[in-house]
Image: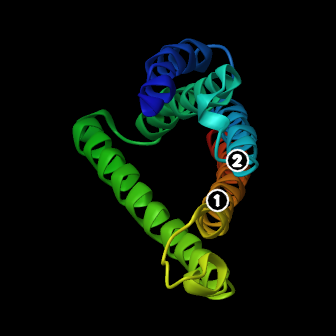
Amino acid sequence: MVLLRLLVAVPIGAVLGGWLTRKVATGVICAGAMAAVAIADVIFARWDANSLASFWATGPLLLAGLGFGLALAPLNSALLAATDAAVHGLASAFAVVARMIGMLVGVSALTEIGLHQFYSASAALPLATTVCGHGLTSCPAYDDRLQSAVLSQISVIFAGAAVCAVIAGIVAVIGSTRTTRATS
């Protein structure tokens, strides 16, 4: 249900991106889209264990979904403008494959970085039996410390995602500028 709040905004962003592509440079739209995603990721990186239960969690989730959707049409438009009509189908297929591979590589890299953070944070924890006493391996005090380690992992993942979104926005502007110069 959490992802539904994010995903509902993706098609809205896609339609808006398609409409804006007729009026605004593709690099500017993509940079704005990635700025929206980066802002949402920074907010996600600051969340605590109870943030998703809050009504206010919906805003950043919608912002991220809108940003992801907003970037779709301008990227496809730029790709189709840069290729001959005879290869538009192939170019579109490569765009889908590249997008999927990029997401998989990004998620894998961010997960690795997050897991490293979690292992570092959990290695610094005292043994559960030390915190809980009496040979117990779980108690609220230890669970809170473990939850803090998990939250540090999630914070690092979203901070990394925000950095990636900013880089993507910069690349979009640079690529758009080069494309505009080449066609002028």
x and y, in percent, of residue 93 in the image: 26, 44
Residue 133 relative to residue 79: left or right: right
Q: Give the amino acid at mark 1.
A: Leu
Kindly state the secondary structure of the residue where label 2 is placed.
loop
Dot 2, crowdedness within 10 Å: few (<14), some or many (≥20)? some
Quadrant position of residue 1: top left
User: Which circle's residue, 1 or 2, is located before the other in the chain?
Assistant: 2
Residue 110 relative to residue 104: left or right: right
Residue at horizontal 60%, vertical 81%? 133
The residue carrying mark 2 is 48
> Which mark identifies residue 151?
1
Residue placed most toward the observer, 181 or 116:
116
Residue placed most toward the observer, 20 or 167:
167
Q: In the displayed structure, would residue 117 be above or below residue 170?
A: below
x and y, in percent, of residue 169 in the image: 69, 46
Quarter of the C terminus within the rendering? top right
- Circle 1/circle 2 CB separation < 8 Å: yes
